[in-house]
Each structure stands twice: as C-alpha cells, then as structure tokens.
Image (tube, rainbow, N blue to C red):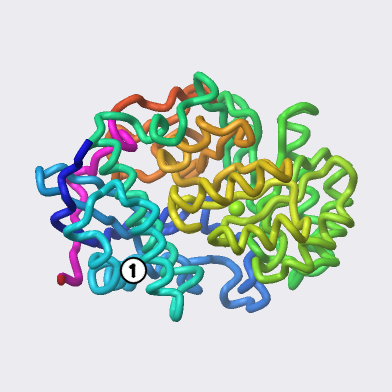
C-alpha cells in the first residue's frame, strides 16, 4: 500500500489553554499557591505564572500529505518549538512517505541531539511524531489505537487531578490527585497544612477512594519521606514527582523509604527511552508517568512502555487527553488514565485542552470509550486563532 508523500509541515502557536494547560486566567485552582521548586522564593510562591510557567504557550503541528490529508497534534513549546519544527525538523518529513515513522523519529532525535535530548526539543519532536500518527490514522481510515495493536479493554477508567477530589468522587472518578500546596520553605506549619488538607479530604471521600499528592518537583528527600509517612495515616495512595527529575538517586531512596503500600510515581518531566531506563533500572518508582507530548511522542512511548512492562512497572501517562487515551486503551500495564480537571474550580468535567480541539472526548461517570474515528479523532477549533511565527 503506497501512501501519498508528505507535502508540507507547519508549526503554529496558540495562547490561552489548549495543550499549555497552565496558560489559564486568574483564580484557577492550577495556579493557587502550588508547591514548586521556586517556592523557596517567597515572591514566586503564590503563582506559578509569576515565574513563567505559561510563557511558552501551545504548539500546533500540521503535516499535509500530497492528497490534501492533514494530520495534526498539539503539545507545549510555543514559539521556540515552532522555530525548531519549521527550520530543522520539517526537512526530515517533506517529500517522504508518512509511514517512515521510525526513521523520521530517529533522524529528528539524532539531528538535534547536540542541542536537544530532553525538554523543549523533545516536546517539538513529540508534536511532529503525534501529528504523523494522526496523519497515518487518517490515511488508513483507522483510529490510532488500531495502529498500536488494538484495544485491550472496552473503555478507560479515570482518576481526576484537581483541587477537589471530593467533587471528583461524585463525578464518578476512581480517585483524586491534589496539588501539594506547601513546600519545605514553609516549614512545619506548611507540613501541618498539607496533612490537614489530606485529612479533610479523607473525611469527605471516605476510606476507599484513592487520594494522591502531586508534589511537582518541590520537595527534598527528607521532607518527602516525612510527608509520605504522615500521609500514610490518611491512606495516601501515591506520592507524585516529589523530587527534582534529575535526582534519580533521591527517587531511589524515597521509594526505599516510603511506607509499605504507598506508591512512588514520577516521570512527567522525563523523556525518551534512555531517561526512563534510568528511572526503571535504579528502581526509582512504582508507576512511570510519561507525557506523550513531552517524552518523544507515541513512537517513543511504545519503547518506554515496553521497558516498564518487562519490569512490572505501571505506565499511567500524564494528562495529554486523546494522545494518551489511544495508547492507554491498548496496554495492560496502563490499567487506568489521568484526567486533568480544567474547570477553574475543579467542579465539573470540561475538555482538557479546551478551547483548542473539537470533538475532544471527556469521561462520563469517570469512564470513556475511545473514539473509533480516524487518527486521534479530534479537529482544530476554527474559532481559536493560530499564529505561524516562522516559515520555511
Ligand atoms: Mg504531576
């Protein structure tokens, strides 16, 4: 079967929500005194936007085939990622067959390795890779989950990430993951407030509902260990991304120190098979949480997941909406998925990447059947303005 060759690759930037889900207005739970590595500076403690968490914005990559079919994907990375896509990565796609997914990934990664390897560059690669999978699905008339080996279950079940696990429970989710609000710089009073918030939420949701803390890289090993043991009394299911993603040794020790039965999770800011190999071989965690828009795209997530599967480690991808759902439904070692509650008060289910995508599916009663429409099954909202800062 011959596919039409790739004619053109384009990169756009979008502001306000979308894949850069931190790019929200005032009063949103996602920017309310959340503990971060910058919390050691009082002036950057109240708002993550104050230190620039939303500075990049969303990247949209479009790949157009000779027959006019367009695959697209969204991730973070904004204007600098758009530059990399247009000026560097596009050359490895244009004029080529869209089914050369492995070769194109390899060339994108190794041609940028001298300035890339992680972060922004791998976000850009991820965006191109996901757009290529979307294009392949559309050209074949199949959903991406067919191309990944097919679904292993009829529907996905979700836990909710947001400030209100109690409301998430009533909306049908299997668990609720709260942002940790106070880091080590806020001392014992901050520690007490963290535990009080957990205790209050445990009271509201009862014994069986999962509660988790997302620590967003904000803690040190000693604080994380103490938090884990105090939180164990309130049945905390997992402690997420407690330490710097560079601190593999700290994660190894935290996993060894954590109370029996509590899971240590991390990886949303890790990238590629080599980064995750470190987490896995050093026995850093019980669950890895790659973001398919940041870790190298679908092509790399397949490899990362295979490594984890062989070690009996679960893969619960970070956020990423449809780009995660098509993968999770095909893998036994991804038994549930994350849903980011993007309503400002975390009190209702709204599309994760709103307002950027159309037909973006959301869980109902905490469950979702992954759509069978070709590609990832979403389209761009024509009402959201796209800005193309570079051309080639
Ligand atoms: Mg997280």
Q: Give the magenta part as a residue range.
A: 374-391
- Give whichever of 94, 172 is nearer the camera: 94
Q: Quadrant of the C terminus?
A: bottom left
Q: Main secondary structure of the magenta part?
A: loop
Expressed as whole percent of the image width and height from the top left, the position of residue 209 reads 72, 29
Tell me: residue 157, above or below residue 48. above
Q: How many marks?
A: 1
Report the front residue among 232 and 147.
147
Q: Which residue does the image show at 68% across and 66% down from the upper left?
A: 218
At x 31%, y 51%, the residue is 100
Q: Can you give x and y, in whole percent of width and height, for residue 9 in the image?
A: 20, 59
Could you say which is closer to the camera, residue 224 or residue 152? 152
User: Does residue 52 lie above or below 101 as drawn?
Assistant: below
Mark 1 near ligand 1 (CB under 8 Å)? no
Residue 379 is a magenta residue: yes
Residue 345 x %, y %: 50, 43
Residue at the (41%, 69%) spot, across then down:
121
Residue 379 location, x and y as percent?
A: 24, 39
Magenta-span inclusion, residue 4: no
Q: Secondary structure at mark 1?
A: helix
- Furthest toward the top, the residue is 154
The residue sitting at 50% across, 57% down in the picture is: 295
To which residue does mark 1 refer?
81
Looking at the rendering, in which quadrant would you find the N terminus?
top left
Q: Quadrant of residue 238?
A: top right
Image side of residue 341 versus residue 175, left or right: left
Alpha-carbon neighbours of circle 1 within 10 Å: few (<14), some, or many (≥20)? many
Horizontally, is 89 left or right of 176 in the view? left
Using the rendered image of the protein, determine whether residue 18 is visible from the camera's viewpoint. Answer: no
């Amino acid at each position: 079967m011959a596919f039409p060759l790739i004619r053109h690759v384009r990169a756009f930037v979008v502001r306000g929500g979308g894949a850069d889900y931190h790019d929200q207005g005032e009063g949103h739970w996602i920017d309310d005194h959340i503990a971060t590595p910058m919390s050691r500076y009082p002036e950057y403690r109240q708002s993550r936007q104050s230190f620039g968490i939303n500075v990049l914005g969303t990247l949209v990559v479009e790949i157009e085939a000779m027959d006019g079919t367009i695959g697209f994907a969204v991730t973070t990375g904004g204007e600098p990622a758009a530059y990399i896509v247009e000026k560097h990565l596009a050359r490895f796609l244009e004029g080529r067959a869209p089914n050369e997914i492995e070769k194109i990934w390899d060339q994108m990664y190794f041609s940028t390795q001298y300035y890339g390897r992680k972060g922004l560059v791998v976000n850009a690669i991820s965006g191109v890779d996901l757009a290529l999978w979307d294009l392949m699905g559309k050209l074949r008339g199949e959903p991406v989950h067919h191309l990944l080996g097919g679904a292993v279950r009829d529907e996905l079940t979700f836990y909710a990430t947001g400030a209100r696990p109690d409301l998430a429970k009533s909306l049908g989710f299997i668990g609720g993951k709260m942002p940790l609000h106070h880091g080590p710089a806020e001392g014992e009073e901050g520690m007490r407030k963290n535990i009080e918030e957990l205790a209050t939420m445990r009271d509201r949701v009862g014994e069986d509902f999962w509660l988790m803390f997302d620590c967003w890289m904000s803690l040190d090993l000693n604080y994380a260990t103490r938090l884990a043991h105090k939180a164990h009394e309130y049945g905390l299911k997992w402690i997420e991304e407690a330490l710097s993603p560079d601190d593999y040794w700290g994660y190894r020790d935290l996993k060894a120190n954590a109370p029996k039965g509590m899971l240590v999770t991390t990886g949303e800011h890790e990238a590629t098979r080599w980064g995750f190999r470190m987490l896995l071989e050093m026995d850093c965690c019980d669950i890895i949480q790659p973001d398919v828009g940041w870790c190298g795209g679908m092509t790399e997530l397949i490899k990362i997941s295979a490594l984890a599967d062989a070690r009996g480690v679960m893969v619960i991808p970070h956020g990423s909406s449809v780009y995660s759902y098509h993968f999770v439904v095909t893998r036994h070692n991804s038994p549930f998925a994350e849903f980011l509650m993007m309503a400002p008060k975390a009190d209702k289910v709204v599309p994760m990447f709103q307002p950027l995508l159309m037909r973006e599916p959301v869980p109902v009663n905490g469950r979702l059947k992954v759509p069978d429409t070709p590609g990832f099954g979403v389209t761009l909202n024509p009402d959201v303005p796209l800005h193309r800062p570079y051309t080639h």
